[in-house]
Image: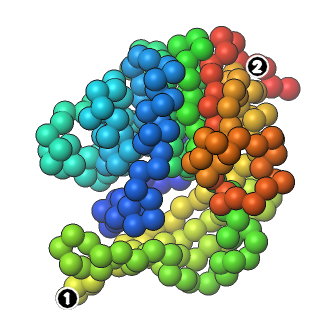
């Protein structure tokens, strides 16, 4: 059996996930996702919805978005977030490579690099193809781990990855070390999460992140039955480029694709 993610976010990893994201990003993808859904009206599913950081603002806009999440800890956090916001979103617990409930969606949202956590990206995309209506839309964001690939972050050495202050005044810290597996195009990461206190709380985890070249990902999408009709970088729809390898950018790539009726056979 294939897993949809290298592992679900658990314990402090789940608790601190949004804290660290929000110190660096204020929900850049929310307006992009809302604009995408306007072009694909109808029931939508966010894959890897986590605690609802990106999904719940869409729900508050009145958009018919449901969430799919593997981690029970993240689902519990989503329940608490929904209570604070006084909303009742639909959240499903399941693996993104196999979950289905018999419906077809007008759009799938896979923001925040979710596909790169898939154990088998092709298997995952072929399953997503089956979840969509014909000509339904796929919103997909991935990133190139340039800091690791270019040596800006030291390999096999612990370094401070994120630091943030929690709402109760405690401090959260993430330390990471990584190893590059060039043959499999994966960054293998070890994480150590710490929350200050007496005694401090700690949690260790491992994560495997797959990277894709631009042409490679387009080929993969087409092989799995998708047609890419838009592409831009760094969450900026004005930055549509023909070849991201020829420009200087932060490594974030967003693709808009539609489901073709039949999956192209691979040879």
Task: Classify mark 1: helix, strand or loop.
Answer: loop
**Is 106 in front, or is 73?**
106
Tell me where residue 52 appears, x and y as whole percent: 32, 45
Question: Dividing the image into 4 quarters, which one contains the N terminus?
Answer: top right
For residue 140, side relative to residue 76 (left or right): right
- Write down the quadrant of residue 200 in the picture: bottom left
Instruction: Specify whether residue 98 is in view.
Output: no
Instruction: Specify whether residue 233 is in view.
Output: yes
Q: Mark 1: give few (<14), some (14-19) or many (20+) Cα within 10 Å.
A: few
- Write down the quadrant of residue 194 in the picture: bottom left
**Is 264 in front, or is 241?**
241
Mark 2 and mark 1: Cα distance apart in space: 57 Å
Is there CB contact under 8 Å for labels 2 and 1? no
In the image, what residue occupies the spot 58% across and 38% down? Answer: 140
Residue that numbered label 1 is attached to: 198
**Is 140 in front, or is 193?**
140
In the image, what residue occupies the spot 34% across and 26% down? Answer: 63
Tell me where residue 87 appears, x and y as whole percent: 18, 36
For residue 15, side relative to residue 134 (left or right): left
**Is 26 in front, or is 153?**
26
Of the image marks 2 and 1, the number of the one nearer the N terminus = 1
Task: Classify mark 2: helix, strand or loop.
Answer: loop
Residue that numbered label 2 is attached to: 264
Tell me where residue 94 appears, x and y as whole percent: 39, 36
Tell me where residue 212 appears, x and y as whole percent: 72, 49
Question: Dividing the image into 4 quarters, which one contains the C terminus?
Answer: top right
């Amino acid at each position: 059996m294939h897993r949809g993610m290298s592992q679900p976010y658990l314990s402090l990893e789940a608790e601190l996930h949004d804290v660290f994201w929000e110190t660096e990003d204020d929900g850049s993808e929310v307006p992009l996702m809302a604009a995408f859904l306007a072009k694909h009206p109808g029931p939508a599913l966010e894959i890897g919805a986590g605690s609802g950081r990106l999904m719940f603002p869409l729900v508050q806009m009145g958009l018919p978005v449901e969430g799919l999440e593997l981690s029970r800890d993240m689902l519990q956090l989503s329940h608490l977030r929904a209570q604070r916001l006084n909303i009742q979103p639909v959240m499903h617990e399941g693996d993104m490579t196999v979950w289905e409930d018999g419906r077809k969606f007008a759009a799938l949202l896979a923001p925040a690099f979710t596909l790169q956590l898939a154990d088998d990206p092709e298997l995952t995309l072929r399953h997503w193809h089956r979840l969509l209506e014909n000509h339904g839309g796929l919103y997909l964001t991935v990133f190139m781990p340039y800091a690791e690939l270019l040596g800006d972050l030291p390999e096999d050495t612990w370094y401070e990855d994120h630091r943030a202050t929690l709402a109760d005044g405690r401090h959260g810290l993430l330390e990471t070390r990584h190893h590059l597996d060039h043959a499999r195009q994966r960054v293998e990461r070890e994480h150590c999460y710490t929350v200050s206190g007496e005694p401090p709380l700690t949690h260790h985890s491992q994560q495997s992140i797959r990277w894709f070249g631009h042409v490679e990902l387009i080929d993969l999408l087409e092989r799995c039955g998708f047609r890419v009709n838009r592409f831009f970088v760094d969450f900026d729809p004005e930055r549509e480029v023909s070849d991201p390898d020829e420009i200087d950018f932060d490594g974030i790539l967003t693709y808009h694709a539609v489901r073709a009726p039949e999956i192209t056979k691979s040879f």
